[in-house]
Amino acid sequence: MFSNYLIGLREGLEASLVVCILIAYLVKTGRRDALKPIWAGIGIAIAIAMGFGCALEFGSQELTFQAQEALGGSLSIVAVGLVTWMVFWMRRTARHLRSELHGKLNAALALGTGALVATAFLAVGREGLETALFVWASVHAASDGTPRPLVGVALGLATAVLLGWLFYRGALKINLAKFFTWTGGMLVVVAAGVLAYGVHDLQEADWIPGINKLAFDISGTIPPDSWYGTLLKGVFNFQPDPTVVQITVWALYLVPVLALFLSPVGFASGKGKVKEPDDQGTQPSTASQA
């Protein structure tokens, strides 16, 4: 449940910050007339993301078991790829996200209503589709027959909306660069578990061999239905009897990606590759002063 809460919080907060920056800029510059197109674009983006998630969930139920496993495994790998790109991108751009959005919004204001709707839709829609895909993959991986994974996601999104509102009102300050670094690192760990589970799905679909070659089996020590087994699965997508291929893929992803992401210099920090940070750009509360 915690891993799904983290996904909802992290992804939802990104979208909330984007909305706060757009709305605050229009209010501050006296362009309240442009708020309706912005909200329309945001609403369309949310509707499409929810529709995409429903299509994944209900559409896959009509498939055969092998097809379900193949689809689930393939989409899990795609989701991990998107999330990996997203956490690196956000770490590099968190410091100048405000100025980047302001530039796009100024261009849209010059073009008219349609451009405003498109700007809001694209800014929020990408986050929404990524969230829907990764949430579906993570819930699918952590599913234990209870609604807890979905509850975790819902609580994470609700927290993100609340934090976004507090940022907008100036009631809460946080260093965005540090926040996205730490939550991004935890999300990489979650993604490693989703990737391993996706590989297992592909093995069950006979797309990847080695389904019967276990790396180890500690089900007797950590029963999957025990409280601590459920906790480990919910947080890390832990499996007590992984295959050799799963463990190999998990390690080959987690170790280099996490090391690169947490590296203080180079690609992870975007040193030398991004613009100078905005004044107080790492303080979300400045959105209300945009």
Image (cartoon, helix red, strand yellow):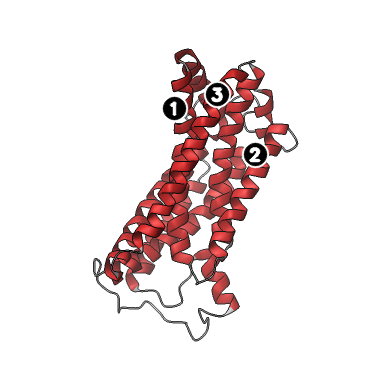
Instruction: Work out which residue is located at the far right of the displayed protein and give it.
Output: 171
Q: What distance separates the C-alpha of mark 2 from that of mark 1?
A: 22 Å
| Residues at circles 2 and 3 in contact by the CB criterion of under 8 Å | no
- Looking at the image, is mark 2 or mark 3 earlier in the sequence? 3
Left or right: 83 as drawn, with respect to 279: left
- Judge by depth and name the residue closer to the eye, 221 or 198: 198
Left or right: 234 as drawn, with respect to 85: right
Report which quarter residue 286 is drawn in.
top right
Closer to the camera: disc 2 or disc 3?
Answer: 2
- Looking at the image, is mark 3 or mark 1 earlier in the sequence? 3
Q: Which mark is residue 118?
A: 1
- Which residue is under mark 3? 99
Residue pictured at 50% horizontal, 78% vertical = 224
**Quadrant in the picture for the N terminus:** bottom right
Above or below, 205 relative to 254: below
Q: What distance separates the C-alpha of mark 3 from that of mark 1?
A: 18 Å
| Residues at circles 2 and 1 in contact by the CB criterion of under 8 Å | no
Q: Which mark is residue 285?
A: none
Q: Circle 1: is it few (<14), some (14-19), or many (20+) Cα within 10 Å?
A: many
Instruction: Work out which residue is located at the far top of the displayed protein and give it.
Output: 110
Q: Is residue 271 visible?
A: no
Q: What distance separates the C-alpha of mark 2 from that of mark 3?
A: 18 Å
Closer to the camera: disc 2 or disc 1?
Answer: 1
- Which residue is under mark 2? 164
Q: Amino acid at mark 2?
A: Gly
SS class, disc 3: helix
- Judge by depth and name the residue closer to the eye, 203 or 89: 203
Residue 86, image x and y in percent? Answer: 45, 43
Residue pictured at 54% horizontal, 76% vertical = 229
- Judge by depth and name the residue closer to the eye, 205 or 259: 205
